[in-house]
């Protein structure tokens, strides 16, 4: 299964193996230490400063999905907290990636659902039933377009998104890259220089 292979690979390795694409903005970081996610993207567009579409997304996504939420530039709000993590766990979702803030950091860490956010923020959000948003339609975060079913991997370094059609090839390339780098590090420990191993002079 793709997520199982992806679980053992780092976000940076997948980004490199994909041809240096798919890296979400570096402001999107684990909301608590140790958060790690690998799963299928469920894109969500939310109005800035409002999280009703995110509550809707928790009930529209499938178990195993990772919500990937674009808040349209309204970063200074706490869109997600312990209530939503509890709801997402009850639905079997795999995690959250959002280009806005999250809150309740200690509770999120205790609950364990992996959350990646553009910081932590106390400010509460509205719940406007007439707000404009979308579920499962493509979104763009930074330079990356995210479609339903794309592979999302987040770890201590950040989050990468790999297009669904490229996933098998990228996973294969990433496994090969890890093996090659393990051999390079073995030779470095044995006394060789990076400059000689790569032929850079
Ligand atoms: O306002 C919200 O729905 C977000 C929140 O605080 C929580 O999930 O605990
Ligand atoms: Mg709350």
Image: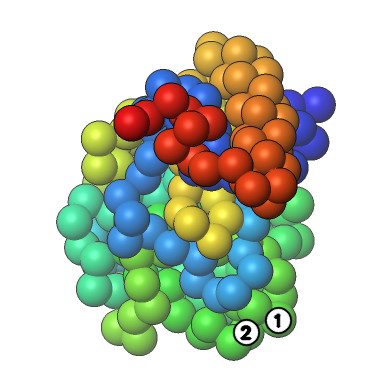
Residue 38 appears in the picture as rendered:
no
Q: Is residue 125 left or right of residue 91?
A: left
Per the image, label 1 sits on a secondary structure element best described as helix
Seen as rendered, the residue at the extreme left is 73
> On the image, which quarter does residue 51 sit in?
bottom left
CB atoms at circles 1 and 2 under 8 Å apart?
yes
Relative to the observer, which residue lies in front, 187 or 50? Answer: 187
Per the image, label 2 sits on a secondary structure element best described as helix
Q: How far from the left and from the top, in percent, is residue 93? A: 68, 50
Any atom of ligand 1 within 8 Å of the CB at mark 2? no
For the point 72% across and 54% down, the residue is 91
Residue bearing the label numbered 1: 110
Q: Measured along the vertical axis of the image, is residue 124 above or below residue 153?
A: below
For the point 19% across and 56% down, the residue is 73
Q: How far from the left and from the top, in percent, is residue 83? A: 59, 75
Placement of the C terminus among the 4 image quadrants: top left
Q: Measured along the vertical axis of the image, is residue 172 above or below residue 39?
A: above
Report how far apart the C-alphas of labels 1 and 2 lie in the structure: 5 Å
For the point 51% across and 25% down, the residue is 17
| Rendered image: mark on residue 64 | none
Residue bearing the label numbered 2: 107
């Amino acid at each position: 299964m793709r997520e199982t292979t992806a679980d053992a690979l780092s976000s940076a390795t997948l980004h490199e193996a994909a041809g240096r694409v798919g890296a979400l903005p570096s402001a999107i970081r684990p909301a608590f230490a140790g958060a790690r996610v690998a799963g299928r993207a469920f894109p969500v567009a939310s109005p800035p400063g409002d999280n009703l579409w995110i509550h809707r997304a928790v009930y529209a996504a499938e178990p195993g999905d990772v919500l990937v939420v674009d808040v349209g530039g309204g970063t200074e709000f706490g869109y997600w907290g312990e209530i939503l993590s509890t709801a997402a766990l009850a639905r079997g979702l795999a995690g959250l990636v959002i280009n806005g803030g999250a809150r309740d950091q200690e509770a999120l860490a205790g609950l364990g659902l992996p959350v990646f956010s553009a910081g932590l923020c106390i400010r509460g959000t509205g719940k406007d039933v007439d707000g404009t948003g979308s579920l499962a339609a493509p979104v763009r975060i930074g330079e990356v377009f995210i479609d339903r079913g794309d592979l999302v991997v987040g770890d201590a370094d950040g989050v990468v998104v790999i297009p669904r059609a490229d996933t098998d090839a990228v996973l294969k390339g990433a496994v090969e890259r890890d093996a090659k780098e393990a051999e390079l590090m073995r030779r470095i420990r044995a006394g060789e220089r990076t400059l000689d191993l790569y032929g850079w002079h």
